[in-house]
Image (spheres, rainbow, N blue to C red):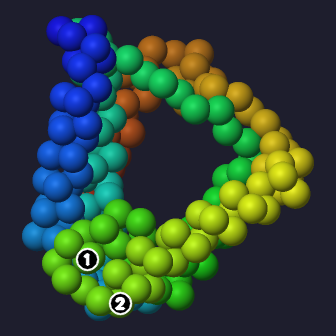
């Protein structure tokens, strides 16, 4: 079945579009596309976004590895480095802090008609992408500092993926219940 999906690029594009629309709709329904919710998260007064993201991490970890276990998905781990993580984090953080949206919530907010997300976020993403591409040759050395390759946490620890997924999922679910019970 996996080979059939990979052979039909138009099907993959439609599946990606449908998944993106559902993701944006769910972000909207969860409140993560509202500016005041995002700013509340940055001010540590509203933990809606953390709850959504932690729920997505657990769902994604279990879902992707379950699909991989039965042969319906393959992992394509991207290489990384500490330099690229720091530069990416700084770019993401500045954009997030200044505008109050991340790329996913920008798309959802544009979909609901928020003009600040359209002009500040979408245009900002285009300008920021262009600037990064223009500066990439000068940043390449910094981006490759601390290169750690294409490795996952279970590979780094030398254990089966489920030995990481199960306790991490349990810890995140426990944290989510505690946050809900505490009123966060």
Q: Which mark is residue 109?
A: 1
Dot 1: what SS? Answer: helix
Q: Is residue 123 visible?
A: yes
Whether residue 129 sits left or right of residue 12 in the image: it is: right
Dot 2: what SS? Answer: helix
At 26% from the left edge and 77% from the top edge, which residue is drawn? 109
Neighbor class of circle 2 (other Cα within 10 Å; few <14, some 14-19, many 20+) is some
Disc 2: which residue:
116
Whether residue 79 sits left or right of residue 61 in the image: it is: right
At 47% from the left edge and 78% from the top edge, which residue is drawn? 123
At 19% from the left edge and 28% from the top edge, which residue is drawn? 11
* Above or below 23: residue 119: below
Residue 62 is situated, as x and y percent measured from the top left of the image, at: 27, 31
Task: Mark 2 or mark 1: name the one nearer the start of the chain.
Answer: 1
* Above or below 161: residue 98: below
Q: Quadrant of the C terminus?
A: bottom left
Q: Quadrant of the N terminus?
A: top left
Residue 124 is situated, as x and y percent measured from the top left of the image, at: 51, 78
């Amino acid at each position: 079945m996996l080979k059939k999906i990979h052979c039909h690029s138009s099907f993959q594009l439609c599946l990606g579009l449908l998944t993106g629309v559902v993701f944006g709709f769910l972000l909207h329904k969860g409140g993560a596309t509202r500016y005041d919710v995002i700013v509340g998260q940055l001010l540590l007064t509203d933990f809606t976004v953390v709850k959504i993201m932690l729920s997505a991490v657990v769902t994604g970890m279990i879902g992707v590895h379950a699909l991989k276990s039965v042969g319906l998905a393959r992992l394509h781990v991207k290489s990384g480095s500490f330099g690229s993580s720091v530069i990416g984090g700084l770019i993401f953080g500045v954009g997030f802090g200044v505008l109050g949206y991340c790329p996913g919530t920008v798309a959802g907010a544009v979909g609901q008609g928020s003009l600040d997300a359209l002009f500040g976020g979408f245009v900002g993403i285009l300008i920021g992408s262009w600037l990064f591409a223009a500066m990439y040759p000068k940043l390449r050395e910094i981006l490759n500092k601390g290169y750690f390759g294409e490795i996952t946490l279970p590979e780094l620890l030398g254990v089966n993926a489920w030995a990481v997924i199960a306790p991490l999922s349990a810890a995140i679910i426990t944290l989510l219940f505690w946050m809900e019970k505490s009123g966060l």
